[in-house]
Structure formats: structure tokens, C-alpha cells
Image (spheres, grey):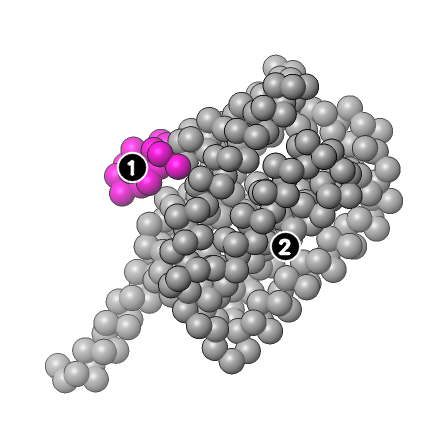
Amino acid sequence: MEWMKILGVVAGVLMLFAMWPAYKWWSQNSPKAEKGDWNAALLAIAAVAAFVGLLIMLVR
Amino acid sequence: MNRFDQAITQSEARGVEANKVLKNTYLLLSATLAFSAVTAGASMAMNMPPIAYLVALIAAMVLGIFVLPRTANSASGIGVIFLITGLMGFGLGSVLSMYLALPKGPEIIATAFGGTGVIFLGLSGYALTTKRDFSFMGGFLFAGMMVVVIAMLANIFLALPALALAVSAGIILLMSGFILFDTSRIIHGGETNYIMATYGLYLSIFNIFISLLNILGVMSGDD
């Protein structure tokens, strides 16, 4: 199990290393949201959350 | 040709190019997902241990970080993406073997598989039909993923089931955002390389599937 923890840490650190340049670029260069953009995105994500809730009810 | 005609022609050309990238992305995505399924089947047949998941994932990430960006503009990029997705599928096989051993295992896997498909197709269809540019979410999504990965790293040592569930839920929501983000970038010409576009969408689908497996596995009572 110790090996699993070590490999898990390696995987996590690699993910952070991979995402860091993209995070830096997008945090500085993201275009501004237009009117209604955030509502449109949050509506879709809320639908996903509700759908996952439905899936949980299916397997219980 | 006056300037108005020229502007329309340029806009049409961009639209045609974006549609070409979209078509190639979805074709390559279908092929890589099918290939992953084959390697997952091979891994299950070989009864690979759980550690194979992490080893395969690390190898795939190294290829994705250091090799794919350098080869994405050449034909060898196709070979690299198949290697990456093959490795990830192979690692997934050992996870699926673990779930199949549970009493409700096949039901959990089938539900996670179907759920992932519905989420991906629904979000892609939504991004394609609303035609909104979701690239404004980039900073927020990458920041969110950094937070989730740090939480994952902490939970390796804390081993809190509630935190693991929260991380899985966070990954599903963030990856859903990434599907909107990546699809709208292709439509609006922000991503012109279909190999890198495929890689992004594949990672979103893979992560949603793994996280759904985890949540459904815990919530069904088979932990």
C-alpha cells in the first residue's frame, strides 16, 4: 500500500506540473464573459449535478 | 471583391475550418475511446493489480506533458495519442476488475458508463447549439482543478471518505465545465489542432467515468 501512496503523490504532482502553465495563461488571458454566459454555463453544470443525483438514486 | 464580401468569405472560411477540426476531433475521439476499451479488456483478462492503474496513468501523463505537444502537428501525434489512450484504458481495466468483484459491481459500471455518455453528449450538444463562447471559464476551471488535485494529494494521507467523495463530485463538475470550454474553443477557432482537442475531451470523459464509478460505488453501499 505504501507504493500506492507514493505513486499517487507522483501522479498528483505531475498533474499540478502539467496544469500550472495552462492555469497561469488562462488566469491572465481569459476573455470576459458576455451577458448571460455564466448563467448558460451554470445551467448546464447544474443539470449535470441533478443527473448524477438521479444516477445515485438508481443504484441505491 | 469589396471589403464586405471579403469579410463574409473570411468568416465562411473560418467556419469551414472549425467544422473540419470538429469532425476530425470527434472521429479521433471515437477511435481512441474504442481503443481504450480494447486495452481495458486486455487488462481485465490479464487480471492486472490495482497498482497498474497508477503506473499506466503516470506513463500516460508523462507522454501527454512531454511528447504529445511536440508531435501534435505531425502524423506521429496520432500514434502518441493512441499510445496515451491505450495506456489509460489498460490502467482502467484493473479498476474495472475491482468493481466487478463487488456485489453490485456490473450495475455500477454500466450506470457509470451510460451516465458518462449522456453527460458528454448532452454537454457537447449544448455547446454546439448555444454557440456561446465558454472560453471565459478557462481561469476558473484550471484554478478549480489545481484545488481538487491538492485536495486529492492531502487525502492520500488523511484518508477521509467524505473528502474523497467531495473530490470526485468536484472533478465531475469541473470536467463538465471543461467539455463546454473545449468544445466551444473548437467551434470558435481557439483550438485548431484536432489531436490536442481530442486529448482534452478524452481526459474529461475518462475523469468523469472514474469519478462516477467512485461516487456510485460508495453511494450504492459497496465501498
Q: Chain of mark 2?
A: B
Q: Quick one: label 1, few (<14), some, or many (20+) residues within 10 Å?
A: some
- Residue B112 appears in view: no
Q: Which residue is mark 1?
A: B71
Judge whether residue B208 is colored magenta: no
Which span of residues is magenta-colored? B65-82
Structural distance between the alpha carbons of marks 2 and 1: 30 Å
Percent across and percent down for residue B171 are: 62, 48
Q: Residue at x 51, y 35 (%)?
A: A13
Q: Residue at x 59, y 42 (%)?
A: B150
Q: Main secondary structure of the magenta part?
A: helix
Q: Which residue is mark 2?
A: B173
Q: Secondary structure at mark 1?
A: helix
In the rendered view, does A20 fall on the left or right side of B140?
left
Q: Do circles 2 and 1 both sit on a common chain?
A: yes
Percent across and percent down for residue A58 are: 82, 48
Is B127 or B216 nearer to us in this picture?
B216
Q: Chain of mark 1?
A: B
Q: Residue at x 40, y 31 (%)?
A: B63
Q: Quadrant of the N terminus of chain B?
A: bottom left
Percent across and percent down for residue B33 are: 52, 38
